[in-house]
Image (spheres, rainbow, N blue to C red):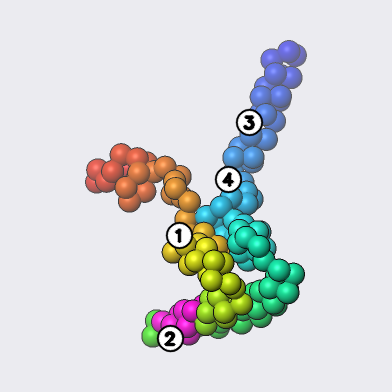
Amino acid sequence: MKTGKFAIILIALMLGTSMIYAQGQRNFNRPGYGYGYGPGTCLTVLSDLTEDQKSKITALETAHQESMAELRVKQRSTFEPIEKNEIRGEMLKKVQVHRNEVKSLLTEEQQKQYDLLQAGNNCGGRGFAPGRRGNRGPAGYGGRGYRGGW
């Protein structure tokens, strides 16, 4: 009787922990994993932004995200590599235009900060934090390097 209860508790515990670990760390909002500084903008990082600058940057960001979402849908709907690359090029152009628009709203000192953030890919970009591949080492093979098998 005691072993039966123990077995049931052990199985429930194993199922519970396996489901928790299956979730991984995808729900964490960490810098370098998508938008690490808030809702996709640099508003919290740049110093001395006026309310006018904040509202204009937020409006630009919203419009930019909508147009990028449309392009992503368009890119995912095609299977032609050439067309995917053309859409990717269009996306990169829109990113550059958006960055220039935001930069034009900033003071000289803020522009320097913005350039530093963009160079480090830490501001709403798709930069990766250290250990992005789960510390699996070079080429992602469990930290052992490639040994020709499992």
Give the label, 4 or 2, closer to the camera.
2
Identify the residue at the far left of this view.
Answer: 148
Residue 29 falls inside the magenta stretch: no
**Residue kind at label 2, given as amino acid type:** Glu
**Occupied quadrant, residue 47:** bottom right
**Residue 97 location, x and y as percent?**
52, 82
Q: Disc 3 or disc 4, which is closer to the eye? A: 4
Nearest to the eye among marks 3 and 2: give it: 2
Q: CA gap, disc 1 to disc 3?
A: 41 Å
Q: Label 3 to label 4, Cα distance in Å?
A: 16 Å
Residue found at x 71% / y 24%: 9
**Which badge, 3 or 4, is on the more N-terminal residue?**
3
Q: Amino acid at mark 1?
A: Gly
- Residue where numbered disc 3 is placed: 14
Label drawn at residue 24: 4
**CB under 8 Å between discs 1 and 3:** no
In the rendered image, is residue 20 in sight?
Answer: yes
In the image, taking residue 138 as reference, residue 41 lies left or right, namely right
First to last magenta residue range: 84-96
Task: Give the structural element (helix, strand or loop) at label 1.
Answer: loop
**Is 94 above or below relative to 7?**
below
Q: Identify residue for label 1.
A: 120
Residue found 28% across the figure and 43% down from its top = 145
Residue 65 in view of the camera: no
